[in-house]
Amino acid sequence: MSDPRALRDAFGAFLTGVTVVTTFNDEGAPIGFTANSFTSVSLDPPLLLVCLAKTSRNYQTLMTTKGFAVNILSEDQKDVSNTFARPVEDRFAAVDWQKGPFGAPVFSDVAAWFDCSAHERVDAGDHVILIGRIEGFENSGKTGLGYARGGYFTPALTEKNLLANVEGSLSVGAVAERAGEILLVPDANGGWTLPFVDKAESEGMEVLEPQFTAEIGLSIQTGLLYSIYEDTKAGRQHIVYRAALGEGAPKIGQMFPLQQLPLEKIQDSAVRETVKRYAQESTLGNFGIYFGNQEKGRVHAVAKKG
């Protein structure tokens, strides 16, 4: 027979997001609790699931409620997670919330929320699996808060850790995507490359979006760090971010579908490998961060325990 504590610790090796499941009790008061046992189930019909311990004080309510919401916390909402994981008297005083389309409490500033009707309840040992049919949802585009081995992690922590190794002026690039296509711009030799701008050592990262926008002629929203590498031949550091490109035709360059990239015309080997990896990772939605030089390095998981 397994040791329950040891088994729980082993389960904790799996990196998860953090959610708050919400509904209303019989008296009409909002209730909620943190849960990382959340996953999507089906797109057609739209289903998701969370697991609830039978010892939970919310068990009886969730077994009879007509629906519930799942709020995926964003990376700056650790306090919200802690509040809903503890026996706080008025948990909802710590968040801005409203009723979702189906009626369950949904939070502001989360990465995403899903308001669900109760589709099915499945007995599973000391837990029950709550399967919800999604009646409404909202995706803010924010990065979710992560959890593993009893601690939180965020992509921002990983980025800060890796950027600590970068010194001097930088050439900053962007894999700017829109609707499954990325922007490539002409290089000096008649081929293609990613858009890059130079950042002086004294400048902050906030200058990047205006510079990119001015060069490309479209709005661009930089997201998570994607690659850090040194061009040892040129003696220059490069950083590449993932980015979302606004609507319209670019002032320079061309949009290419991720599965039809002109790799043979990207002469810079580091850029070629960057866009090739991006195309591969985008099919799974599982992105890492490359750290090395133009020839060799390793891809770090986007996770850092904190």
Image (cartoon, grey):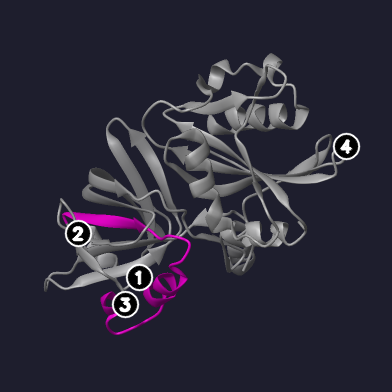
Mark linked to residue 56: 1
Across and down, in percent, residue 197 comes to 62, 42
Q: Amino acid at mark 1?
A: Ser
Q: Residue 197: in sight, yes or no?
A: yes
Where is residue 222 shown, x and y percent of the image? 51, 47
Kind of residue at badge 4: Lys
User: Decide: marks 3, 1 in contact (CB < 8 A)?
Assistant: no
Q: Which is more N-terminal, label 2 or label 4?
A: 2
Identify which amino acid the numbered label 2 is placed on.
Answer: Ala
- Please identify, in this view, whether the residue under mark 1 or under mark 2 is nearer the observer: 2
- Return the residue at label 3: 94
Q: Is residue 195 magenta?
A: no
**Marks 3/1: CA distance?**
21 Å
Mark 3 or mark 4, whichever is nearer to me: 4
* Marks 1 and 4 close (CB-CB < 8 Å): no
Mark 1 or mark 4: whose residue is earlier in sequence: 1
Mark 4: give few (<14), some (14-19) or many (20+) Cα within 10 Å. few
Q: Quadrant of residue 77?
A: bottom left
Check the picture and name the quadrant holding the N terminus: bottom right
Residue 136, percent from left and from top: 22, 45
268 lies above or below 98: above
Instruction: Determine crowd level at label 3: few under 14, some 14-19, many 20+ residues with C-alpha closer than 10 A.
Output: few
- Give the SS element for disc 1: loop
Circle 2 or circle 3, nearest the eye:
3
Residue 233 shows which numbered tag?
4
Give the quadrant of the C terminus. bottom right
Q: Which residue is the site of mark 2? A: 104
